[in-house]
């Protein structure tokens, strides 16, 4: 059975930085609100991870392309809490992910992917203010093997844990014990309200068909990185093949050059735990997608419909 809404690929959106969000964060006079932990230990203590020393780093990330380059330089996709409302933070000594407007629940930050087909991803980037055709796509089965799981849209009991509940942690945003989700699975929960609330609003993200990856065992590890590896070895699960989305053909040559330079700088034996061996990395530009859509008369093209061997590829 062929369905145009199904795909074997999941994509990590890469947005350009939201200047409004940055201004709100910069205006905060307490650094501790910005320095967020990667996870929380079973006793509720925040776990902070020092980033690995990277061979290159852009100090300023003004565009989505800058964000993509920094992901490649880091060697992993950083997990996050998806902070949405930093202006709700108070200036007391008590902070929490709830006050920060985090949309991730439980004690583990995560990396988000969408299972929406390629043509839908293209439409999304055309309709949203800070979205552009930049992303990292990986096979759904590969992500599953590394620990990613589809999200859980909505629960019957969505109360947050309060003092006295065994799931309660002062700084984390955990669901109550009787929510039905263990703490290690709560990163998968997405607020869903398909009936009118008192204010008439609805919350519906089901169209994204989201998957999430979290290192739920990080609290038990001596060393780990705060994200899903793409070039890291030894410290994190790592993708073996993926497709990079860029907004135009003009990005391809510089991006291949960046990958080649990084490979030469790091080599096979290095202190950064990087590896470029056995990697398959293709690059798909928006221009190429539009050409193939036109040539094949297919406005509903999925990544599954594209011959990856026809795309530019980085290899050693």
Image: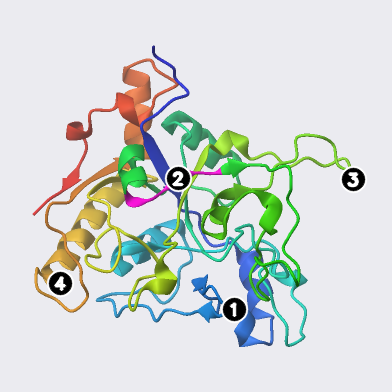
Residue for badge 4 = 266
Q: Quadrant of residue 266?
A: bottom left
Magenta stretch: give its range: 146-151
Q: Can residue 244 be seen from the camera position used here?
A: no
At 12% from the left edge and 57% from the top edge, which residue is drawn?
277
Rendering coords of residue 67 (x, y %): 42, 62
Label 3: few (<14), some (14–19) or many (≥20) C-alpha neighbours in 10 Å: few
Q: Which of the pair 11/125 is nearer the observer?
A: 11
Eye-nearest disc, 4 or 2: 2
> Which color scheme is applied?
rainbow
Q: Can residue 236 be seen from the camera position used here?
A: yes
Residue for badge 3 = 199
Real-space CA distance between mark 1 and mark 3, rounded to the nearest whole angstrom: 31 Å
Classify mark 3: helix, strand or loop.
loop
Residue for badge 1 = 34
Eye-nearest disc, 2 or 1: 2
């Amino acid at each position: 059975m062929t369905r145009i809404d199904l795909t074997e690929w999941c994509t990590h959106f890469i947005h350009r930085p939201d200047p409004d969000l940055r201004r709100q964060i910069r205006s905060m006079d307490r650094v501790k609100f910005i320095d967020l932990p990667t996870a929380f230990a079973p006793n509720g203590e925040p776990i902070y991870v020092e980033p690995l020393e990277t061979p290159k780093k852009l100090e300023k990330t003004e565009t989505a392309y800058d964000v993509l380059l920094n992901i490649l330089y880091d060697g992993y996709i950083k997990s996050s809490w998806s902070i949405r409302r930093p202006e709700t933070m108070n200036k007391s000594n008590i902070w929490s992910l709830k006050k920060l407007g985090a949309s991730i629940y439980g004690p583990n930050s995560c990396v988000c992917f969408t299972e929406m087909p390629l043509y839908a991803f293209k439409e999304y980037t055309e309709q949203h203010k800070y979205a552009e055709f930049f992303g990292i796509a990986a096979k759904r089965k590969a992500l599953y093997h590394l620990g990613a799981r589809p999200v859980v849209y909505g629960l019957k009991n969505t109360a947050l844990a309060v003092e006295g509940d065994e799931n309660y942690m002062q700084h984390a945003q955990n669901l109550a014990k009787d929510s039905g989700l263990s703490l290690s699975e709560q990163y998968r929960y997405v607020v869903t309200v398909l009936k009118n609330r008192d204010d008439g609003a609805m919350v519906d993200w089901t169209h994204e068909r989201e998957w999430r990856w979290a290192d739920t065992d990080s609290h038990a590890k001596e060393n780990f990185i705060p994200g899903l590896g793409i070039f890291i070895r030894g410290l994190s699960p790592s993708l073996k093949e993926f497709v990079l989305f860029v907004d135009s053909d003009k990005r391809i040559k510089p991006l291949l050059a960046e990958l080649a330079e990084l490979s030469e700088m790091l080599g096979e034996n290095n202190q950064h735990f990087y590896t470029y061996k056995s990697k398959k990395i293709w690059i798909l530009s928006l221009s190429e997608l539009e050409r193939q859509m036109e040539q094949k008369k297919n406005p509903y093209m999925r990544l599954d419909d594209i011959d990856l061997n026809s795309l530019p590829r980085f290899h050693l």
